[in-house]
Image (spheres, helix red, strand yellow):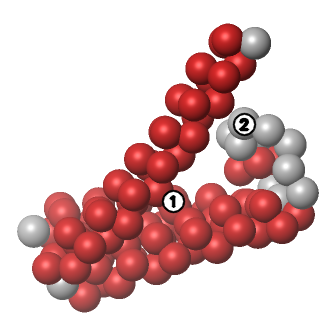
Amino acid sequence: MKLLRNLTLVGGMVTLLFAFGFIFRLSFATSIWPWEDGRYSYLFVGSILAAVSAAALWVGWTGEFGALPAGALNIFVIALTTSIYFSNSHHRDAQA
């Protein structure tokens, strides 16, 4: 259990680091974003990452692993919808 707590804390801290990177438009974070966007887009992505990191840090700090399924569902929905968007975008560009 201690390993899971530590991994959850480290994952939350890394996510929080990227959240601040997007919020303050730091190059290590914005360089992984696939297209140039405006200030509010980076702020939006940073706020989503901050929310995910807050949940991960809370679970890691308190050891309340019963909250992990809800957090995992949150990440799954984000990843699924992002994958669908990029897949559709790729297929549209390939047909053009």
Badge 1 local density, few (<14 within 10 Å), some, or many (20+)? Answer: few
* SS label for mark 1: helix
Q: What amino acid type should be assigned to the residue bearing mark 2? A: Pro
At which x and y percent is residue 87? Answer: 53, 29
Say if 24 sits above or below 37 in the image.
Answer: below
At which x and y percent is residue 61? Answer: 30, 83
Say if 94 sits above or below 78 in the image.
Answer: above
Q: What amino acid type should be assigned to the residue bearing mark 1? A: Val
Of the pair 29 and 90, the residue shown nearer to us = 90
Badge 2 local density, few (<14 within 10 Å), some, or many (20+)? Answer: few
Residue furthest left as drawn: 1
Which residue carries the number 1 mark? Answer: 14
Q: Residue at x 88, y 63 (%)?
A: 39
Q: Give the Cα separation between the discs numbered 2 and 1.
A: 20 Å
Which residue carries the number 2 mark? Answer: 34
Say if 36 sits above or below 5 in the image.
Answer: above
Q: How many marks?
A: 2
Q: Residue at x 17, y 61 (%)?
A: 3
* SS label for mark 2: loop
Name the quarter where the C terminus is drawn.
top right
Of the pair 11 and 86, the residue shown nearer to us = 86
Q: Can I make out residue 4 in this image?
A: yes
Indicate which disc, 2 or 1, sits on the residue closer to the N terminus. Answer: 1
Q: Can I make out residue 28 in this image?
A: no
At which x and y percent is residue 9? Answer: 36, 69
Name the quarter where the N terminus is drawn.
bottom left
Q: Which mark is residue 72?
A: none
Q: Residue at x 15, y 69 (%)?
A: 2
